[in-house]
Amino acid sequence: MSKSAGCCKRFLHYAFDYETPKTLVIPSLGVGFVFRFTQFLVVMYVVGYVCVVQKAYQDTDTVISTVTTKVKGFAFTNTSDTEPRFWDVADYIIPPQSDHSFFVLTNMVVTPKQVQSHCPEVSHCCYKTDNQSQGVKFIFHPGIQTGLCENYSTTARTCEVLSWCPLEIDTKLPEHALLVAAENFTVLIKNSITYPKFNFHRRNILPHVNSSYLKRCEFSRLTDPHCPIFRLKHIVSEAGEDFQDMAVKGGVLGILIDWSCDLDWWAGECLPKYSFRRLDNKHPVNNVAPGYNFRFAKYYKAADGEETRTLIKAYGIRFDVIVFGTAGRFSIVPTIVNLGAALSFLSLVPVVADWFLVTCSRKRDLYSRHKTTHLTEDADSASVTDFSPSLSLMIFSTD
Ligand SMILES: Nc1ncnc2c1ncn2[C@@H]1O[C@H](COP(=O)(O)OP(=O)(O)OP(=O)(O)O)[C@@H](O)[C@H]1O
């Protein structure tokens, strides 16, 4: 036969030989154990992981929510640097309301009676060259440099600027927070959520809560885990921080509300779970630019009609309310799809058992020989006589 004819024949066999599965019954305890054990693993995966842990029989939806907050509490300050002063919520919550967060003022640097004029910079030294002042170059100056040097004190000369004068000196931040009493302020968090796919609505003020209970309750993980009124000190300490420490330079704290729920009737009630964590990471070694602060001013006209302002550099804690969650409910479509996908792993079981059969069992040579039988049309009787004794051997012998 020529080379090309042989090649052609091989191709025809490859393309058109029909393969059909043959059942071999192998009375081997070892192979039988591997087969059943692999089957057991697949069934455990389907029942334990797919059904119980992943709840793959459920359709899911993510939460849509809205949050409002109201802080209450008052404080009295009387330090050497400030006048005696009573503080209520309108003084220390800035701005009065915002989305999903609230800022509580705890410390500040006040620069009163600022007017628009010329004054010397606070810390940049100044010398003159060709009638032009030269200062140390900083990216940020507190005003527009006029090109003149001014006596800042009897020993220091600094560059003159056009700005709101006198300039702020923010190096004198009080070491202890001004509003130490802020730790006892309370906040009411009203949170409404919806799972639109399931037409499910809920509030964190639960149906059994009435107004007299709301007036006196306070969140406590052990005794009152569903009260929506939180003491600020409690929030900060649950986040692993010290309120008085954090109040000096400020920071950002997260109030996390987890609405992950199983909405099947057998799963129980859908309730919010609260947790707290600091969001602005404190670096234990590189503590450059710690905390949270910003500036704002209160404007007024002085007796002589000049526009004047009080500049406040405010330090405090911003509380961000973060709502998240996924709900699931039984649905036939994901049940069929996920169960079908998981059960398809059962088709891998014979592959594992076959592999064990032809590589690890004692009679692997015998099993390998009979695993595949190749029938040729012109020698069918020979292959049958070859095959029958072996087959009977395989059915009746044990490992
Ligand atoms: N931060 C808070 N700490 C403690 N209780 C609060 C707080 N915020 C609100 N409450 C109380 O919760 C209830 C509901 O508050 P809500 O703001 O809906 O009503 P309100 O009558 O306008 O409240 P209020 O006039 O007392 O500020 C009220 O009894 C209120 O006093």
Image (cartoon, grey):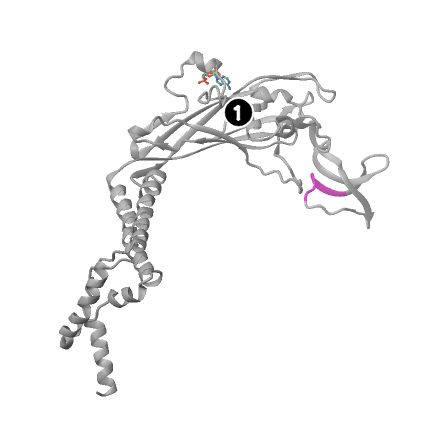
Above/below status of 106 relative to 7: above
| The magenta segment | 140-147
Name the residue beneath numbered marker 1: 96
212 is within the stretch colored magenta: no
Between 214 and 135, the residue placed more toward the observer is 214
How many numbered markers are drawn? 1
- Quadrant hosting residue 318: top right
* 120 lies left or right of 306: right
Quarter holding the N terminus is bottom left
Q: Residue at x 59, y 17 (%)?
A: 74
146 is within the stretch colored magenta: yes
Between 291 and 120, the residue placed more toward the observer is 291
The residue type indicated by label 1 comes to Pro
Residue 129: % across, % down: 82, 50
Residue 355: % across, % down: 33, 60
Above/below status of 93 relative to 118: above
